[in-house]
Image (cartoon, rainbow, N blue to C red):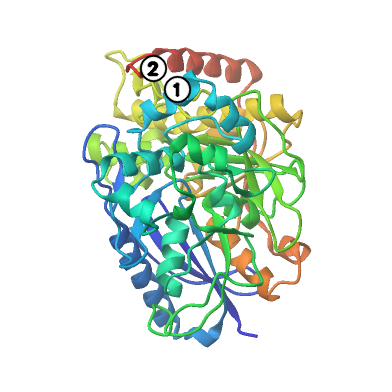
């Protein structure tokens, strides 16, 4: 068998390709950013053609840098930004509109209408999700209703939908229209019990079933297809793993037992708690989602707390406020002051996700005085990442009865040692970062490799996991609760800022 497994990690701000060996070690990567298209307030789009072109480029560059060819890869996996919706023509393969990104809030009226007439309760029960702008179903409906000719094309069977995993599979394999259970569970259209598209949910959004991809396991020995000879890999590689990015991080963090949890720090934050084969319904603003399904085995479920804006708040300091030149500078600037100076920043740029689910919220910086500087704002930004995670930790404890002993972390912001120390202080438990911090790509590689026998089982994957660094709480309980109390007051200031019909 070949020595490596490849993984495409198609994220909100960039696309990367990573190559892993049997020990789960990174042996190659390349990454490219893509444009964030912001046509008006609350709208966020990506160009699907640009994403595909970036995917081709990162694969070719990473493979060539290591001198590898298609015969060197045992399998290929994909992980992706989950709820970002692409609609394209099945005959031409051309997008019919830009991808509408998971952060986009243009569907707020669609979401609020679902809750007004009781359909929202059905969506919660069947799909495990609250009606929200976050998920794909409303984005598909918006495209059908607002882009000329798409409704007619969909009725003819010509317009088809996928999250970005499906878009990449389509292009990599020459037209296979598939997704996996984790991505399908982020649409508001899949029944969590049957793992199939639900006709009643489809009717709520007036979406033809013919638009939707076939739902398959996350790790599939039957493959979703093979890469094309004229594609970026230059040959036939079995595509056998697909996981939404946060579920991929669970697999990469080897959270295979009920009660194990991880927090991924990216554009947003996403904390998942493995609940095993049991469907746990949340009473505290969390999502019930599919964690993974390996082959014919029973699906494993998770509770998820999704936070819209964390890493992108640091980008905002860089790109809009211009108080830092790069992300690393946020740590240096925030470290130059001993505390936040009374400043709290709630980055509700797209409303608030878990556990609040308030699309009427907007961002606020509170507690300012003449004493405060850009350093206090930088520190408040890092603290906002951590306090939002505390909100989710508390909700998970209430829903599951599980109290965390340690918080596993991964993603880009985990290189910020100050932020990780603050995270430990805010939640009051140790924070543990693995040697391989880019666990989303690793999880996709694991799913693909399991399908072809590159790794025998999950026990073998556990042996690959090693801790890189651990942070221990230093705040007193009084300091922790005082800070969190002020955070909750700041959150209250952001609510009811915009009117939602």
Corner quadrant of residue 251:
bottom right
Q: Residues within 10 Å of mark 2 (few under 14, many from 20)?
A: many
**Residue plotted at (34% across, 20% down):** 365
Q: Which percent across, then down, holds residue 283?
A: 66, 23
**Residue plotted at (31% across, 20% down):** 372
Q: Of tags 2 and 1, which is closer to the observer?
A: 1
Q: Is residue 374 left or right of residue 180?
A: left
Corner quadrant of residue 428:
top right
- Report the disc number at residue 358: 1
N-terminal-most mark, 2 or 1: 1
Q: In this orientation, does residue 52 appear?
A: yes
Identify the residue under disc 2.
Answer: 494
Q: CA distance from mark 2 to mark 1?
A: 10 Å
**Would you place residue 249 above or below residue 400 in this image?**
below
Residue 59 or residue 46, whichever sits in front = 46
Q: Which percent across, then down, holds residue 4?
A: 58, 78
């Amino acid at each position: 068998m070949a020595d490596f497994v490849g993984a495409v990690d198609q994220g909100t701000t960039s696309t990367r390709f990573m190559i892993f060996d049997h020990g789960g070690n990174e042996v190659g990567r390349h990454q490219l950013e893509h444009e964030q298209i912001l046509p008006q307030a609350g709208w966020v789009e990506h160009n699907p053609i640009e994403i595909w072109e970036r995917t081709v480029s990162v694969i070719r560059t990473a493979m060539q840098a290591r001198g590898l060819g298609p015969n060197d890869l045992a399998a290929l996996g994909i992980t992706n930004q989950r709820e970002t919706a692409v609609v394209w023509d099945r005959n031409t393969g051309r997008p019919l509109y830009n991808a509408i990104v998971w952060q986009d809030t243009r569907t707020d009226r669609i979401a609020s209408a679902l809750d007004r007439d009781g359909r929202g309760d059905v969506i919660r029960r069947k799909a495990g999700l609250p009606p929200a702008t976050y998920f794909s179903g409303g984005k598909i409906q918006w495209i059908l209703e607002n882009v000329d000719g798409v409704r007619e094309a969909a009725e003819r069977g010509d317009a088809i939908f996928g999250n970005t995993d499906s878009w990449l599979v389509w292009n990599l394999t020459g037209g296979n229209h598939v997704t996996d259970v984790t991505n399908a569970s982020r649409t508001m259209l899949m029944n969590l019990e049957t793992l199939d598209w639900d006709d009643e949910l489809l009717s709520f959004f007036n979406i033809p079933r013919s638009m939707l991809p076939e739902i398959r396991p996350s790790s599939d020995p039957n493959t979703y297809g093979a890469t094309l000879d004229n594609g970026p890999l230059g040959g036939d590689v079995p595509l056998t793993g697909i996981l939404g990015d946060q579920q991929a991080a669970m697999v990469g963090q080897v959270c295979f037992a009920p009660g194990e949890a991880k927090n991924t720090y990216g554009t947003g934050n996403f904390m998942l708690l493995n609940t095993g084969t049991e469907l746990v319904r949340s009473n505290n603003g969390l999502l019930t989602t599919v964690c993974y399904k390996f082959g014919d085995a029973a699906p494993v479920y998770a509770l998820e707390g999704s936070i819209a804006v964390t890493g992108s708040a640091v980008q905002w300091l860089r790109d809009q406020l211009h108080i830092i030149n790069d992300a690393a500078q946020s740590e240096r600037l925030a470290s130059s002051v001993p505390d936040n100076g009374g400043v709290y920043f709630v980055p509700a740029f797209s409303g608030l996700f878990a556990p609040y689910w308030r699309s009427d919220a907007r961002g606020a910086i509170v507690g300012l005085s003449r004493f405060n500087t850009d350093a206090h704002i930088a520190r408040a930004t890092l603290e906002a990442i951590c306090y939002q995670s505390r909100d989710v930790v508390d909700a998970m404890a209430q829903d599951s009865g599980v109290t965390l002993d340690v918080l596993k972390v991964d993603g880009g912001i985990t290189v910020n040692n100050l932020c990780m120390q603050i995270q430990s202080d805010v939640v009051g438990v140790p924070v543990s970062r693995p040697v391989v911090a880019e666990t989303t790509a690793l999880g996709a590689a694991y799913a693909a490799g399991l399908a072809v026998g590159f790794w025998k089982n999950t026990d073998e994957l556990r042996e690959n996991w090693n801790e890189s660094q651990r942070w221990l709480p230093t705040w007193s309980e009084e300091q922790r609760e005082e800070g969190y109390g002020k955070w909750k007051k700041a959150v209250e200031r952001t609510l009811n800022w915009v009117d939602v019909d």
